[in-house]
Image (cartoon, rainbow, N blue to C red):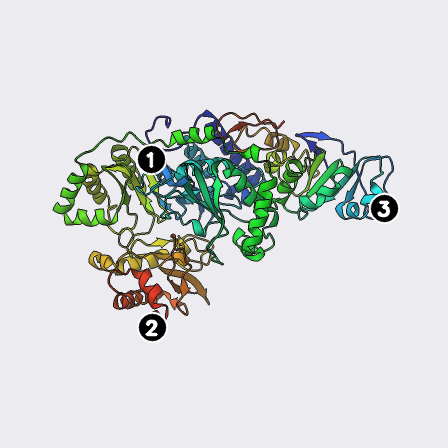
Amino acid sequence: MPLLDHGRPVEDRFVAVADDAPLPADAPALIPFARLQREADALAGRNAALGVQVTSATHAEDIAPFLDRVTLVVVEFPKFRDGRGFTIARTLRERYGFSGEIRAVGHVLPDQYEFLVRCGFTCVAVSDGADLGVWAAALERFHVAYQPGLDTAPVLSGLRRRLALG
Amino acid sequence: MDMAVTRAGIYHYDEFDREFLRERVAEFRGQVARRLDGALTEDEFKPLRLMNGLYLQLHAYMLRCAVPYGVLSSDQMRQLAHIARKYDRGFGHFTTRQNLQFNWIKLEEAPDALAALAEADLHALQTSGNCIRNVTTDEFAGAAADEIVDPRVYAEILRQWSTLHPEFSYLPRKFKIAITGAPTDRAAIQVHDIGLLAKRGPAGEVGFEVWAGGGLGRVPIIGTKLREWLSEADFLSYMEAVLRVYNALGGRENIHKARIKILVRDVGAARFIEMVEQEFATLPREKFRLDPAVVAGIQAHFASPPFVVLPNAEADLARAVSDNAAFADWVAHNTNPHKQPGYISAIVSLKPIGGIPGDATDAQMDAVADLAERYSFDEIRVTHYQNLVLPHVRQDELFAVWQALDALDLATPNVGTVTDIIACPGLDYCSLANARAIPVAQLLSERFADLKRQYDIGPLTLNISGCINACGHHHVGAIGILGVDKKGEEFYQITLGGSAGNDATIGDIVGPAVPYDDVTDVVERIIRIYLSLRQTGENFLQTYRRAGMAPFKDALHAAA
C-alpha cells in the first residue's frame, strides 16, 4: 500500500504491531490506540519511535495526553464521506501543537488530498494500484484558497491566500 | 463576456477568484472523466458532483446554480438565460434558497454549463452535498429602510470562508447559514443550521446574535440562541467552533438524525453552548480573526450605487398611484421601503395566477436583466419566496417599471397574499418526492385568483412541500401543505400557524391527510373559517393564534 508524502511515494518505516504481539525494541512500531492507553506507562521508557492508530470516532482530546509518547498518529477513514478525521488532525496540530507525522489511511479520495494537507496531514496511504499521477495532480489543482489552513500559505489580500501544498 | 465593469453592488471577482473557478471547473471535468472510465465508483462520484450542484432527478440531471445571498447583476442574469436556452429547455426555476435550478441538464454537458457559469463569475459550488451551502440573506439587503447592518458583507465573507473549506466539506449532513441585518427577519434565521442577526453595539460597532440548530425537514425545530453578541473580529472563529463541534459529534449513522439540530436537541442547548464556547476558547483566534481591513475591502464591493437627490419623486409616485388603480394595487403589495429618499424596491412576482412558482423563461430573465440595467443600477435579487427584486428603483420611474413588467406577465400584484405560494418541484421533477406540489399550487392559485378576495384575506403564507424533506417550507407557512404517499396515492397533510419570521413557529397538524382532489376545497374552507372568526385588523396568523386549532378542524370534516 503506497505511502505518499506531498504526492511522492515514501518508505513506511513503521511496523504495525497487533494488539498483543511484542513490540520490536529498536524499530518504529505502530500500535492501536487502545494498547497505547493501556500500556502508556510501560511505553514511556521506549527508545524507538512509536506510532498510534486511531479511528475517526476518536476525539483529539482523548489522544492529547499521549502525544508526548508518539511521533506518528494514523487516522483511519472508514468511508471517504466521514469527515471527522479532518477535525482530528487539525485539532492535534492547532490545539495540542503536535508536530509529528499525521497519516490518513482507509477510504480517501485524491479529490480530498488537498483538504488533508491543509488540515495538517503529512502522509496518506493509498490503495495498491492507485493512479499516483492523479494523487500528485490533486495537489497542483488549486492555487488559491479562501481560509487559513496548516499548509504554508501566504495571504494575498482579503480572505484569499496563495496555496503552497507541494 | 467581460463582467469586470458593472455598477451593481455585487462582489466583483478579480483574477484570483477567476483562477480559482477555472481550476474548479477543470477539476470537475477530470472527475466526470474518471467516473466515465470507472476510476471513480458512482458512490464516490455522487458527493463530488453534488458539491458541484449536480443532482440526479427523475428524468434528467438538475443543475443548481448558486446565487450567492440572492444577488445577481444584469449580465449574470443574462448568462443564466443563455444557459437556460443552450443547455436546458428555455427556463429556470428560482428556489427558496435564492438559487436557480435547471432541470434538464445532460451529464456530458454539465462541465460546459459550469464553464459558462464561470464566464459570468457564477458557479454551482456547494449548492448540494454535506457541506456548507450557499449563504442566504434578506432580499432587500443594502436597500431596506429598516436595515441596521448590510448583511451582504458578512454573507460574502462566509461564502469565501466556506468555499472548499478543508475541514468542513465532509460534514455529517448539509449545513445552511442565513444572515440578516434588519430587526424584521426576512431571512428565516431561526430555522437554519446557523442563523445570524448582524447588529450594532453602543459605539456603532458591528456584532452578531448567533442562533444554531434550527431547521425544517423531517424534524422541524426552532433554533437555539447561542450568543446575544459576537464581535466582528471573532466572527469566523466562532463559526469554526460551531462547525468543529458539529463535525466531530454530529450523527453519521442515520441520515435522518445527522443535522446539527438533532445534536443540539440530544445534548441539550446548555451543553451544546458550553461545548461551542470551550472550542472557541481554545482555537487559535488570531489566525481566524476578521481583520477590519478585510471587512472594509469587501464592504467596498457593496458600496451604495450613485443615488441622486430626487425632490419630486415621491410626489410623482403618489400622483401615479392615485391615477391608476391597478398600479396602486401593485405598489401596495409589490414594493418595499428604501433607505434612500426617492427610491423604492420593486418585487417581480414569479407567481402568475395558475403558474409554476419560481419559474422564469429565458426571455423573462433577459427582460428583467434589461430592466435592472435601466432602472436598478444593474442589480437583481432572488427572494426565498421565489420572486425577484429590483432593489433600487427611482420612485418617479416605478410606473414605467410596472408597465414593462406587466407586459412580461411579471407584475401580478400578489406578493404576500394567498397566491404568493412557495412550492418545491415535487413529484414532477424530484426523485425524493412522494407527491406533486406544483399542480397543487396551480389549483390553489386559480381558486384564489380574484384579487379583491386575495386582498380581503390579507397577508398569508401558503407553503407546499412534496415530501417530508420540506423544501417548500410547509412547516413555517401560515397554511402548510405536505404531500405524503398513502398506498401509492397522493395525500396532503395540512398544518396551520407556521411562521419563519421573528415569531418563528412550526405549524400544527390539523388532522388526517386529505386526497389530492380535496386539497383546494379544504384550504377554501380553512380560509372561510378564518374570515368568519377574524376580528377587525387581524390577519390569518393572528386569528389562528387567538382562536386556536379547534374551529379549523371542521374544514377537514366537511371533506368526508
Q: Is residue B465 above or below residue B548?
A: above
- Where disc 1 sits, the SS reads helix
Same-subunit check for callouts 3 and 2: no
Q: Is residue A160 above or below residue A103?
A: above
SS under mark 2: helix
Point out residue B173 in the picture as x, y percentages from the top left corner. Answer: 54, 49
Q: Which mark is residue A21?
A: 3
**Quadrant in the rendering for residue B269:** bottom right
> What's the amino acid at mark 1?
Arg
Q: Nearer the viewer, residue B203 or B1?
A: B203
Q: Around disc 2, counting alpha carbons within 10 Å, would you say few (fewer than 14), some (14 to 19), or many (20 or more)?
A: some
Q: Residues within 10 Å of mark 1 (few under 14, many from 20)?
A: many
Name the kind of residue labelled 3 in the image.
Ala
Q: Nearer the viewer, residue B190 or B400?
A: B190
Looking at numbered disc 2 in the image, what kind of residue is underneath it?
Asp
Q: Which mark is residue B554?
A: 2
